[in-house]
Amino acid sequence: MPSERPAARFLPTLTEVVKPAVPSTAQPTEDDLIARVMDRLMPMLNTRLEAHFEIAMRTQLQHMRAGLQQDLESAVRTALEAELANASKPSVPR
């Protein structure tokens, strides 16, 4: 007596091969939205920060240069006055 068994399947069905994607109905979290916005803004913010930093450094360097020049002029003036004062004094013979 032949038994009635189902025929063996050698190929999987389409639903076994491709699992249907479950549509995502979840809304992005606040952290996800913040991360997205930050990713978009950071290049622009970095560019602006570098520009402001460059301006601030240039301004600071100009102030330092002006102060150094004034200090140098004052030191030269003091040294010159001291030298001229020594030159105008009569030499004391030994």
Image (cartoon, rainbow, N blue to C red):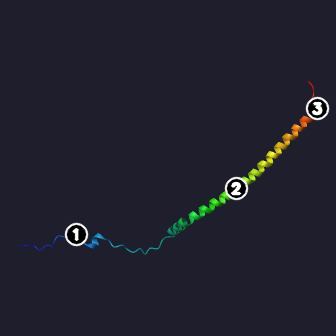
| Residue named by callout 3 | 90
Residue bearing mark 1: 11
Give the crowd class for mark 2: few <14, some 14-19, many >=20 residues within 10 Å. Answer: few
* Viewer-side residue, 57 vs 36: 57
Question: Tag 1: residue type?
Answer: Leu
Mark 1–mark 3 Cα distance, whole angstroms, equals 120 Å
For residue 12, side relative to residue 53 (left or right): left
Marks 3 and 2 in Cβ contact (< 8 Å): no
Q: Nearer the viewer, mark 1 or mark 2?
A: 2
Q: Is residue 72 above or below residue 63?
A: above
For mark 3, does the 10 Å Cα neighbourhood hold few (<14), some (14 to 19), or many (20 or more) residues? few
The answer to whether mark 1 and mark 3 are in CB contact below 8 A is no
Quarter of the image that includes the N terminus: bottom left
Residue placed at 54% from the left, 67% from the top? Answer: 40
Q: Is mark 3 on a helix, strand or loop?
A: loop
Q: Distance between the residues labelled 3 and 2?
A: 50 Å
Question: Tag on residue 27?
Answer: none
Question: Is 73 left or right of 5, judged from the image as shown?
Answer: right
Where does residue 22 sit, x and y in percent of width and height? Answer: 37, 74
Give whichever of 9, 68 is nearer the camera: 68
Q: Which amino acid does label 2 sit on?
A: Arg
- The single residue placed furthest to the top in the displayed view is 94
Disc 1 packing (10 Å; few <14; some 14–19; many ≥20):
few
Residue at image coords 93%, 34% = 89
- The quadrant of the rendering that contains the C terminus is top right
Q: What percent of the width, then of the height, locates residue 76?
A: 82, 43
Mark 1 or mark 3, which has the lower sequence index?
A: 1
User: In this figure, which residue is indicated by the disc labeled 2?
Assistant: 58
Name the spot of residue 27 as percent of width and height, x first: 47, 74
Mark 1 or mark 2, which has the lower sequence index?
1
